[in-house]
Image (cartoon, grey):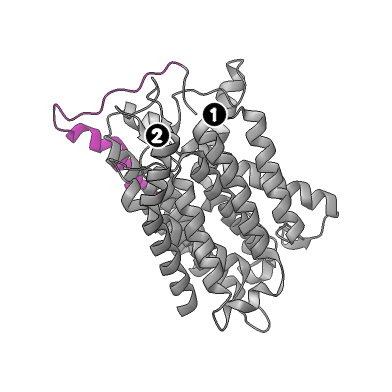
Amino acid sequence: MREYVFVILVAMTATYLAVPAAYRLALRLNAFTPVRDRDVHAVPIPRLGGVAFLVGYAAATLVATKLPFLRQVYVTPELWGVLVGATVICLVGAVDDVVELDPLTKLAGQIVAAGVMAFSGVQFFSVPFLGVTTVLPGPVLAVLTILTVVVSTNAVNFIDGLDGLATGVVAIAASTFLAYSYWISGQFDPPNVFTSSTFVSAALLGCCLGFLPHNFYPARLIMGDSGSLLLGLLLAAATITTTGGVSPAQVSDTALGATLLPLLVPLAIILLPLLDVVLAVVRRTRQGRKPWQPDAQHLHHRMLRIGHGHRRAVMLLWLWAAVAAFGSIGYVFLNPVLASLAVALAFVVAIALTRVLPRFSVPGHRPVSVPEKPGGR
């Protein structure tokens, strides 16, 4: 675990120190998010935060190759493929931050980045389903891998609507994947906690922790598409490398747990961004609009509309993400009854805070309502 702690610190420090350079680059390239009806910012804010994320992740990757135990993970090209894929998708996002690419071009960039990762070995080789490890044909697994990357990148992109929201949600997901992957790999025969999935989770967590001080409301720099797409790709890499190498018996020694948990845990860990993107697609298609056409009805818009301020809305959504993520792995580490009680208690607390706190907003400090007309990611 000491080497993973070091990876987290390296990624965090490098990301934190790279933010001023990313800020100056955004100013030089005039990469600003314009103020739109759906936005909560009153003034344009520089983006290109993804450049700092990429620096942090690259630094963690290079340092890990020199560590006594982690360097064994680089025997295969997987992690180099993740770094190349991250560079590709960050570049696509950075161009979009400056000149606004059309949706199909961004989608093509996501597919290319996903393809690079899949070609390097970061793909589903099997899927744990109904208590058994199911091996699917190679083309099916490759398509499933690319689909996971595309869904994850867009999910993070959709939820990136308030300062610090996406960064915190991804940090929660990364920390949960870190604990889950570390524990699962300890069940190998022989045990080996030095795996691609655990490294990606640790480096991703460090990048988020290093960026968050600059990104929490009021943000000095926002991640932009260069950041949200990059975080989504790294989150997908953690999901794929963890889920694809799991044997149901390693997750739970009960029949029901081995049947359900290997697939439900990864989905629960990224539940909040997944829920937001699914609701957006359903909502927009039912209105006769294209799924990528923006509106102002995301989860964070709804939190503002019911009376929460910017920071409180972010922290409450963090709480909901933590309830789903940590609650899911509770079933891996704890007795099912105890885990269920903990999840139920956390769920009740989250509902109570979401519903009750707006009543205590100080007059004159209530958030400005967000328009419900179309216009938003």
Q: Point out residue 271 in the picture as x, y percentages from the top left corner.
A: 52, 46
Q: In the image, 65: left or right of 259? A: left
Question: Nearest the camera: 144 or 46?
Answer: 46
Q: In the image, 350: left or right of 289? A: left
The disc placed on residue 300 is 2
Residue 4 in the image: above or below residue 227:
below
Q: Amino acid at mark 1?
A: Glu
Residue position marked by numbered label 1 in the rendering: 100
Q: In the image, 350: left or right of 150? A: left
Label 2 and label 1: CA atoms lie apart by: 23 Å
Q: Amino acid at mark 2?
A: His
* Magenta-span inclusion, residue 282: no
The quadrant in which residue 16 appears is bottom left
> Would residue 331 be visible to someone looking at this image?
no
The disc placed on residue 308 is none
What residue lies at 33% left-to-right and 29% top-to-bottom? 40
